[in-house]
Amino acid sequence: MKAIRIAMLLAVVMMLTGCGHKAVEDIRYKVKKAELGTVQYTVRQIIRNSDETWQLFGDKKVLFTVKATLKAGIDLQKVTDDDIEVNGSSIVLHLPKAEITAINIEPKDIQVAYSKVSILRSDYTQAQCDEILQAGELSIRTDQALRQSIVAEAEQNARDFFELLLRSNGFEDIKIFFK
C-alpha cells in the first residue's frame, strides 16, 4: 500500500503561511478552519462467495476484485482555543485523533475475476452480487489492523506537517499531542 499526501495539505499550507508566532489569535483561527487530509491508501481486496446449498446439482461460485480508496486526516474544526498554547517561541498543539474521512469504491473498480455456475444452477442475481459486495465493503470498513495503520500514518503526517509549518513561522519549541 502506498501512502500519498493529499492536495488538502497544499490548501492548508497556503492558508497558514504568513502567520508569525506573534499573531496567536490569527494562528488559532486559521488552524481551526479546515480538515487536514494527510494520507490516502488504495486497497485491493478479493471477495468470494460459494453457494453450496445445492451441491447435488453442481457448484455456484463467484470471485470479485475490488479497489477501494481510503482517506484519513484530522478534523481541525474540533480544535478549540485551549488546544493551542503559545508562550514566546514555544507552542503546544493538541490535535484531535486522526480518523478515516472517506472510503470510496468506484463501480468501475469492481470486477468479476471468476465465476462458475453449473448448468443445473442459476446465475447470481444482481441482488445476490450486491449483498456479497456489501459484505466485502463492510470487511474493508471494519478491518481494525488496516484502520490503525492508516490512522497512525495520518497522525505522523499531520505531526510532520505542523512541525514544519510552525518552524517556518518562527516557533522553536514545538510539542504536538493527539487527544
Image (spheres, rainbow, N blue to C red):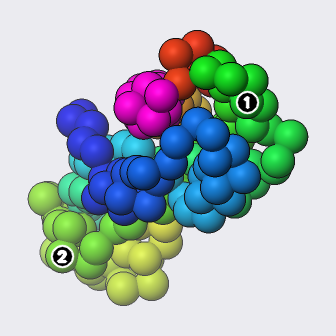
Residue located 64% across and 55% down the image? 26
Give the magenta-colored segment's residue range: 156-170
In this rendering, would 140 be left or right of 177? left
| Labels in figure, total | 2
Near-viewer residue (78 or 126): 78
Q: Quadrant of residue 103?
A: bottom left
Q: Which of the labelled discs sits on residue 108, or is there none?
A: 2
Q: Is residue 160 magenta?
A: yes
Q: Is the magenta stretch mostly helix, strand or loop?
A: helix
Give the Cα distance between marks 1 and 2: 49 Å
Near-viewer residue (21 or 16): 21
Q: Residue 179: x and y, percent?
A: 77, 31
Q: Residue 7: x and y, percent?
A: 29, 58
Between disc 1 and disc 2, the foreground one is: 1
Label 1: how many Cα within 10 Å (few below 14, some 14–19, many 20+): some
- Most distant residue in the right direction: 82
Residue located 69% across and 44% down the image? 24
Residue 21 visible here: yes
In this rendering, would 157 be left or right of 79? left
Q: Residue 38: x and y, percent?
A: 41, 44
Three-letter amino acid code of the residue under disc 2 = Lys
Q: Badge 1 is on which residue?
A: 86
Residue located 32% across and 77% down the image? 124
Label 2: how many Cα within 10 Å (few below 14, some 14–19, many 20+): few
In this rendering, would 43 be left or right of 150? left
Residue located 50% across and 48% down the image? 19
Three-letter amino acid code of the residue under disc 1 = Val
- Classify mark 2: helix, strand or loop: helix
